[in-house]
Amino acid sequence: MLITSWPPLSPQVPFPHLKLHRYIEAINASRKCCVCLYTLSTSAFPSGKLTAACNHPAAACTSCLTDLFTDCFAKNVASFEAPKCPECAETLSVTDVQRIGGRSLASAYNERLTLSLLRADPDFRECLNPDCSAGMGRGQLHEGGEEAPIVTCKYCSAKSCFAHKLPWHEGQTCEEFDEANAEYRAAREKENQLSTKYMEKKYKRCPKCKAFIEKFHGCNHMTCRACEHEFCWLCMAPYRGRLGIMDFGNRGHYVGCRFHG
């Protein structure tokens, strides 16, 4: 709230050496960070909004946001979640992170996003060697599937089985391994069924770049992390563009979508 009149609410002027107009300017040029709760100069906050989707000025200071990014990108790939605005929970893009935290953090974010997208691909396999030089959570896409089941890590050369997601069973084909481990085979079939149902429920492909997308929570207005295309999770209609939802409102949703109207 801007102060335009005198005296302020407090009977004591905290800056008696300042003239009236300078005191008012000092109060108006500061705000409270929603993370650390300190009242700071506006210069301690990122300029403008954190994301294009936010409808408010940056509510967290640059220092707190940098700490948030650092902690987020240090997590294991399997538990990674994209950083969000502390005020409204809109997801930050790589460009947003670079503007606020610099190239190094933006590069770390881009790497995490890439790995997250790769992990959603059914042909992705994580290296099972705990001493792999690439670190925990890393892996690669494997061509050939179960027809060429030996996955050789490009970082440490450790071998694993594409079909069983186990270290390679040396001296046994996949069929021989299954025969010797009937109990494991039953568990694997159940896992595959559950995995298929989970993929159908949780993942969709971006209508623009075809990258896998998982919906964690929140509304059905989705933004692809790979290409930043915005679309409806239910009907896949675009939010922006000549016939987008932003311009046409609910008429922009495809027929059959519960938001169409």
Image: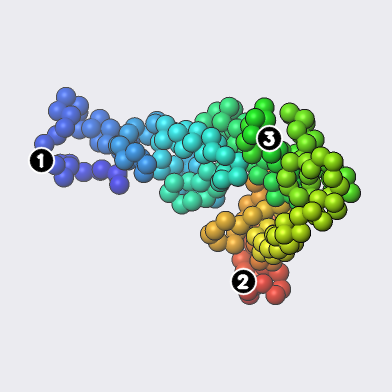
Between disc 2 and disc 1, the foreground one is 2
Q: Earlier in the sequence, mark 1 or mark 3?
A: 1
User: What residue lies at 55% left-to-right and 28% top-to-bottom?
Assistant: 102
Q: Assess whether mark 1 and mark 2 are in contact (beta carbons under 8 angstroms).
A: no
Type of the residue with mark 2? Phe
For the point 30% across and 37% down, which residue is it?
A: 38
* Residue on which disc 2 sits: 259
Front-most of residues 44 and 198: 198
- Amino acid at pointer 1: Pro
The first of marks 3 and 2 along the sequence is 3
Where is 191 relative to 79, above or below? below
Residue indicated by mark 1: 11
Residue 79 placement (x, y as % from top left) = 56, 45
Q: Which corner quadrant holds the C terminus? A: bottom right
Q: Of residues 25 and 89, which is closer to you in this image?
A: 89
**Other residues around mark 1 within 10 Å, as few (<14) / some (14–19) / many (≥20):** few
- Asked which secondary structure carries label 3, the reply is loop
Disc 2 versus disc 1: distance between alpha carbons? 54 Å
Q: Is 209 placed left or right of 63 in the picture?
A: right
Callout count = 3
Residue ID for mark 3: 129
Disc 2 secondary structure class: loop
Q: In this view, does 19 lie to the left or right of 62?
A: left
Could you give the CA–CA distance between mark 3 and mark 2, rounded to whole angstroms?
Answer: 47 Å
**Whether residue 151 is visible:** no
Disc 3 residue type? Asn
Q: Which of marks 3 and 2 is in front?
A: 3
Q: Position of residue 194 (x, y in %)?
A: 68, 63
Q: In this view, does 185 lie to the left or right of 95?
A: right
Compare marks 2 and 1 and give the one earlier in the sequence.
1
The image quadrant that residue 112 belongs to is top right
Query: Measuring 85% from the left and 41% from the top, which residue is drawn there?
Result: 171
